[in-house]
Image (tube, rainbow, N blue to C red):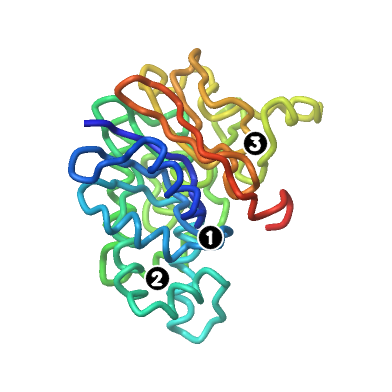
Amino acid sequence: MNTYVVGDVQGCATELERLLDAVRFCPGQDQLILLGDLINRGPRSVDTLRLARSLGDSCRALLGNHDLSVLARLSMADHGRPLNATAQEIAAAPDGEVLRDWLRNLPLAIDHPQALMIHAGLPPQWTRADALRLASEVETALRGPDHATFLHQMYGDEPDIWRESLDGYERLRFITNCLTRLRYCRPDGQLVLSEKLSPAQTARHGEEPLIPWFALAGRASAAQRILFGHWSTLGRVYWPEYRVWGLDTGCVWGGRLSALHLETWRLIQAPSDGHKKPGAG
Protein backbone atom coordinates (compact mmCIF):
# COMPACT_ATOMS: atom_id res chain seq x y z
CA MET A 1 0.00 0.00 0.00
CA ASN A 2 1.09 3.55 -0.76
CA THR A 3 0.04 6.40 1.49
CA TYR A 4 0.02 9.95 0.16
CA VAL A 5 -0.49 12.92 2.50
CA VAL A 6 -1.57 16.03 0.62
CA GLY A 7 -1.59 19.67 1.70
CA ASP A 8 -4.32 22.26 1.18
CA VAL A 9 -6.34 21.61 -1.99
CA GLN A 10 -8.71 24.58 -1.53
CA GLY A 11 -11.04 23.59 -4.32
CA CYS A 12 -8.28 22.89 -6.86
CA ALA A 13 -9.72 19.56 -7.98
CA THR A 14 -7.88 19.65 -11.30
CA GLU A 15 -4.53 19.77 -9.52
CA LEU A 16 -5.58 16.98 -7.14
CA GLU A 17 -6.57 14.82 -10.11
CA ARG A 18 -3.24 15.65 -11.74
CA LEU A 19 -1.36 14.64 -8.59
CA LEU A 20 -3.27 11.35 -8.20
CA ASP A 21 -2.57 10.54 -11.85
CA ALA A 22 1.14 11.30 -11.35
CA VAL A 23 1.44 8.78 -8.51
CA ARG A 24 -0.88 6.27 -10.22
CA PHE A 25 -3.15 6.26 -7.20
CA CYS A 26 -5.09 3.01 -6.90
CA PRO A 27 -8.26 3.15 -4.75
CA GLY A 28 -8.63 0.04 -2.63
CA GLN A 29 -4.87 -0.42 -2.50
CA ASP A 30 -3.49 3.07 -1.77
CA GLN A 31 -4.58 5.67 0.74
CA LEU A 32 -4.95 9.43 0.36
CA ILE A 33 -4.86 11.70 3.43
CA LEU A 34 -5.92 15.33 2.98
CA LEU A 35 -4.69 17.77 5.63
CA GLY A 36 -7.69 20.11 5.60
CA ASP A 37 -8.86 23.14 3.62
CA LEU A 38 -10.31 20.89 0.98
CA ILE A 39 -12.50 23.71 -0.32
CA ASN A 40 -12.82 27.48 -0.87
CA ARG A 41 -10.88 29.92 -3.07
CA GLY A 42 -10.29 27.44 -5.91
CA PRO A 43 -12.74 26.89 -8.77
CA ARG A 44 -13.94 23.32 -8.11
CA SER A 45 -14.87 22.94 -4.44
CA VAL A 46 -17.85 20.66 -5.03
CA ASP A 47 -15.79 18.45 -7.34
CA THR A 48 -13.07 18.23 -4.68
CA LEU A 49 -15.58 17.02 -2.09
CA ARG A 50 -17.09 14.55 -4.54
CA LEU A 51 -13.68 13.15 -5.45
CA ALA A 52 -12.59 12.72 -1.83
CA ARG A 53 -15.91 11.18 -0.80
CA SER A 54 -15.97 8.84 -3.83
CA LEU A 55 -12.73 7.23 -2.67
CA GLY A 56 -14.45 5.84 0.43
CA ASP A 57 -12.06 4.23 2.88
CA SER A 58 -9.16 5.01 0.53
CA CYS A 59 -9.38 8.67 1.58
CA ARG A 60 -9.10 10.21 5.01
CA ALA A 61 -9.41 13.96 5.42
CA LEU A 62 -9.17 16.63 8.10
CA LEU A 63 -11.18 19.79 8.62
CA GLY A 64 -9.36 23.08 8.06
CA ASN A 65 -10.40 26.64 8.79
CA HIS A 66 -11.79 27.17 5.28
CA ASP A 67 -13.90 24.04 5.54
CA LEU A 68 -15.30 25.20 8.88
CA SER A 69 -15.95 28.68 7.50
CA VAL A 70 -18.04 27.27 4.66
CA LEU A 71 -19.93 25.01 7.07
CA ALA A 72 -20.65 28.07 9.21
CA ARG A 73 -21.87 30.00 6.17
CA LEU A 74 -24.19 27.18 5.21
CA SER A 75 -25.50 27.01 8.76
CA MET A 76 -26.11 30.77 8.82
CA ALA A 77 -27.94 30.49 5.49
CA ASP A 78 -30.43 28.25 7.25
CA HIS A 79 -31.32 31.40 9.19
CA GLY A 80 -31.48 33.72 6.19
CA ARG A 81 -27.85 34.94 6.10
CA PRO A 82 -26.09 35.43 2.71
CA LEU A 83 -23.75 32.75 1.34
CA ASN A 84 -20.26 33.15 -0.06
CA ALA A 85 -19.47 31.69 -3.50
CA THR A 86 -18.31 28.28 -2.25
CA ALA A 87 -21.28 27.87 0.09
CA GLN A 88 -23.60 28.84 -2.78
CA GLU A 89 -21.96 26.19 -4.97
CA ILE A 90 -22.50 23.49 -2.35
CA ALA A 91 -26.03 24.61 -1.50
CA ALA A 92 -27.02 24.52 -5.19
CA ALA A 93 -25.53 21.07 -5.87
CA PRO A 94 -28.02 18.18 -6.07
CA ASP A 95 -25.86 16.28 -3.59
CA GLY A 96 -25.04 19.38 -1.56
CA GLU A 97 -26.64 18.17 1.67
CA VAL A 98 -24.79 14.85 1.46
CA LEU A 99 -21.47 16.65 0.85
CA ARG A 100 -22.15 19.08 3.69
CA ASP A 101 -22.82 16.24 6.15
CA TRP A 102 -19.75 14.32 4.94
CA LEU A 103 -17.59 17.40 5.50
CA ARG A 104 -19.07 18.11 8.94
CA ASN A 105 -18.20 14.60 10.11
CA LEU A 106 -14.49 14.83 9.28
CA PRO A 107 -11.99 14.81 12.18
CA LEU A 108 -9.65 17.59 13.32
CA ALA A 109 -6.70 15.26 13.95
CA ILE A 110 -5.54 11.90 12.60
CA ASP A 111 -3.50 9.51 14.70
CA HIS A 112 -1.40 7.70 12.10
CA PRO A 113 1.40 5.29 13.08
CA GLN A 114 3.90 7.41 11.13
CA ALA A 115 2.83 10.85 12.41
CA LEU A 116 0.22 12.99 14.08
CA MET A 117 -1.69 14.83 11.36
CA ILE A 118 -3.42 18.18 11.88
CA HIS A 119 -4.35 21.14 9.74
CA ALA A 120 -2.60 24.00 11.58
CA GLY A 121 -0.77 23.74 14.92
CA LEU A 122 -0.58 22.78 18.58
CA PRO A 123 -0.08 25.00 21.63
CA PRO A 124 3.09 24.17 23.58
CA GLN A 125 1.21 22.60 26.49
CA TRP A 126 -0.40 19.80 24.50
CA THR A 127 0.98 16.31 24.08
CA ARG A 128 -0.03 14.13 21.15
CA ALA A 129 -2.61 12.44 23.38
CA ASP A 130 -3.98 15.84 24.42
CA ALA A 131 -4.36 16.89 20.79
CA LEU A 132 -6.36 13.78 19.93
CA ARG A 133 -8.47 13.99 23.07
CA LEU A 134 -9.29 17.66 22.60
CA ALA A 135 -9.92 17.31 18.86
CA SER A 136 -12.57 14.73 19.71
CA GLU A 137 -14.41 17.31 21.83
CA VAL A 138 -14.84 19.60 18.83
CA GLU A 139 -15.71 16.65 16.60
CA THR A 140 -18.48 15.69 19.02
CA ALA A 141 -19.87 19.24 18.90
CA LEU A 142 -19.78 19.30 15.10
CA ARG A 143 -21.52 15.95 14.79
CA GLY A 144 -24.15 16.68 17.40
CA PRO A 145 -27.68 18.07 17.04
CA ASP A 146 -26.58 21.53 18.19
CA HIS A 147 -23.70 21.87 15.70
CA ALA A 148 -25.13 25.10 14.26
CA THR A 149 -24.72 26.82 17.62
CA PHE A 150 -21.10 25.74 17.84
CA LEU A 151 -20.41 26.99 14.30
CA HIS A 152 -21.83 30.39 15.29
CA GLN A 153 -19.75 30.48 18.48
CA MET A 154 -16.40 29.32 17.09
CA TYR A 155 -15.27 32.73 15.77
CA GLY A 156 -12.89 34.90 17.80
CA ASP A 157 -9.28 34.98 19.01
CA GLU A 158 -10.01 34.58 22.72
CA PRO A 159 -9.05 32.82 24.89
CA ASP A 160 -5.43 32.82 23.72
CA ILE A 161 -3.71 30.82 26.51
CA TRP A 162 -4.51 27.19 27.20
CA ARG A 163 -5.95 26.17 30.54
CA GLU A 164 -7.42 22.74 31.15
CA SER A 165 -10.13 24.50 33.16
CA LEU A 166 -11.53 26.22 30.07
CA ASP A 167 -15.06 25.05 29.40
CA GLY A 168 -18.03 25.58 27.13
CA TYR A 169 -17.62 27.42 23.85
CA GLU A 170 -14.44 29.15 25.06
CA ARG A 171 -12.79 25.75 25.35
CA LEU A 172 -14.08 24.56 21.98
CA ARG A 173 -13.03 27.84 20.33
CA PHE A 174 -9.48 27.56 21.67
CA ILE A 175 -9.15 23.97 20.49
CA THR A 176 -10.53 24.86 17.06
CA ASN A 177 -8.22 27.86 16.71
CA CYS A 178 -5.16 25.76 17.46
CA LEU A 179 -5.99 22.87 15.18
CA THR A 180 -7.25 24.95 12.24
CA ARG A 181 -5.74 28.48 12.47
CA LEU A 182 -2.51 28.54 14.49
CA ARG A 183 0.85 29.59 13.02
CA TYR A 184 2.66 31.59 15.71
CA CYS A 185 2.91 31.81 19.49
CA ARG A 186 4.59 34.32 21.75
CA PRO A 187 7.42 33.01 23.95
CA ASP A 188 4.97 32.44 26.84
CA GLY A 189 2.75 30.24 24.64
CA GLN A 190 0.09 32.85 23.89
CA LEU A 191 -1.54 32.23 20.52
CA VAL A 192 -1.02 34.77 17.74
CA LEU A 193 -3.67 34.11 15.12
CA SER A 194 -3.47 37.16 12.86
CA GLU A 195 0.07 36.83 11.44
CA LYS A 196 0.41 34.95 8.14
CA LEU A 197 3.90 35.89 6.94
CA SER A 198 6.86 33.52 6.83
CA PRO A 199 9.20 33.26 9.83
CA ALA A 200 11.89 35.13 7.86
CA GLN A 201 9.52 37.99 7.02
CA THR A 202 8.19 38.21 10.55
CA ALA A 203 11.71 38.33 12.03
CA ARG A 204 12.44 41.46 9.97
CA HIS A 205 9.63 43.38 11.61
CA GLY A 206 11.75 43.91 14.73
CA GLU A 207 8.77 43.76 17.08
CA GLU A 208 8.11 41.38 19.96
CA PRO A 209 9.29 37.98 18.74
CA LEU A 210 6.74 35.62 17.28
CA ILE A 211 7.73 31.98 17.21
CA PRO A 212 6.35 29.31 14.89
CA TRP A 213 4.26 27.04 17.06
CA PHE A 214 6.53 24.07 16.30
CA ALA A 215 9.73 25.95 17.29
CA LEU A 216 8.60 27.00 20.76
CA ALA A 217 10.98 25.84 23.52
CA GLY A 218 9.59 23.14 25.76
CA ARG A 219 6.80 22.10 23.40
CA ALA A 220 5.19 19.00 24.92
CA SER A 221 4.74 17.41 21.49
CA ALA A 222 8.36 17.96 20.41
CA ALA A 223 9.18 14.23 20.27
CA GLN A 224 6.36 13.56 17.82
CA ARG A 225 6.53 13.69 14.04
CA ILE A 226 3.77 16.05 12.90
CA LEU A 227 2.36 16.70 9.42
CA PHE A 228 0.29 19.83 8.85
CA GLY A 229 -0.93 22.24 6.17
CA HIS A 230 -2.36 25.77 6.47
CA TRP A 231 0.84 27.80 6.11
CA SER A 232 1.56 28.50 2.44
CA THR A 233 4.15 31.22 3.23
CA LEU A 234 6.23 28.98 5.49
CA GLY A 235 9.10 28.83 3.02
CA ARG A 236 10.14 25.26 3.74
CA VAL A 237 8.37 21.92 3.66
CA TYR A 238 10.55 19.90 6.02
CA TRP A 239 11.95 21.17 9.34
CA PRO A 240 14.04 18.20 10.55
CA GLU A 241 15.12 19.92 13.75
CA TYR A 242 11.46 20.03 14.84
CA ARG A 243 10.25 16.80 13.19
CA VAL A 244 7.52 18.61 11.24
CA TRP A 245 6.40 18.71 7.61
CA GLY A 246 4.35 21.69 6.38
CA LEU A 247 2.60 20.52 3.20
CA ASP A 248 0.64 23.61 2.16
CA THR A 249 2.72 24.81 -0.79
CA GLY A 250 0.25 27.41 -2.07
CA CYS A 251 -1.50 25.50 -4.83
CA VAL A 252 -4.40 27.95 -5.07
CA TRP A 253 -1.91 30.86 -5.31
CA GLY A 254 -0.02 29.37 -8.25
CA GLY A 255 2.42 27.27 -6.24
CA ARG A 256 2.21 23.49 -6.22
CA LEU A 257 0.05 20.80 -4.71
CA SER A 258 2.29 18.61 -2.58
CA ALA A 259 2.00 14.98 -1.54
CA LEU A 260 4.29 13.22 0.91
CA HIS A 261 4.70 9.49 0.25
CA LEU A 262 4.83 8.07 3.77
CA GLU A 263 6.52 4.82 2.86
CA THR A 264 9.60 6.60 1.46
CA TRP A 265 9.19 10.18 2.80
CA ARG A 266 9.48 11.35 -0.80
CA LEU A 267 7.79 14.60 -1.84
CA ILE A 268 5.75 14.60 -5.06
CA GLN A 269 4.36 17.85 -6.46
CA ALA A 270 1.90 18.80 -9.18
CA PRO A 271 1.93 22.25 -10.81
CA SER A 272 -0.93 24.67 -10.19
CA ASP A 273 -2.99 26.52 -12.74
CA GLY A 274 -2.78 29.61 -10.47
CA HIS A 275 -6.33 30.49 -9.48
CA LYS A 276 -5.72 33.39 -7.06
CA LYS A 277 -3.23 36.20 -6.58
CA PRO A 278 -1.78 36.66 -3.07
CA GLY A 279 -3.85 39.22 -1.21
CA ALA A 280 -6.94 38.52 -3.29
CA GLY A 281 -8.76 36.89 -0.38
Q: Earlier in the sequence, mark 1 or mark 3?
A: 1
Q: Which amino acid type is marked by label 1?
A: Asn
Q: Earlier in the sequence, mark 2 or mark 1?
A: 1
Q: Which amino acid type is marked by label 2?
A: Thr
At which x and y percent is residue 162? 46, 39
**Marks 1/3: CA–CA distance:** 18 Å
Q: Which residue is mark 2?
A: 149
Q: Nearer the viewer, mark 2 or mark 1?
A: 1
Measured along the vertical axis of the image, is residue 158 above or below residue 234?
A: below
Q: Which residue is mark 3?
A: 233
| Residue at the far bottom in the pictured view | 80
Specify the quadrant that holds the C terminus: bottom right
Q: Which residue is mark 1?
A: 40
The residue tagged with tag 2: helix, strand or loop?
helix
> Which residue is located at x 44 percent, y 73 percent?
90
Specify the quadrant that holds the N terminus: top left
Measured along the vertical axis of the image, is residue 14 above or below residue 29?
A: below
Measured along the vertical axis of the image, is residue 264 above or below residue 171?
A: above
- Which of these two is toward me, 5 or 155? 5
Q: Is residue 35 visible?
A: yes
Q: Earlier in the sequence, mark 3 or mark 2?
A: 2
The residue tagged with tag 1: helix, strand or loop?
loop
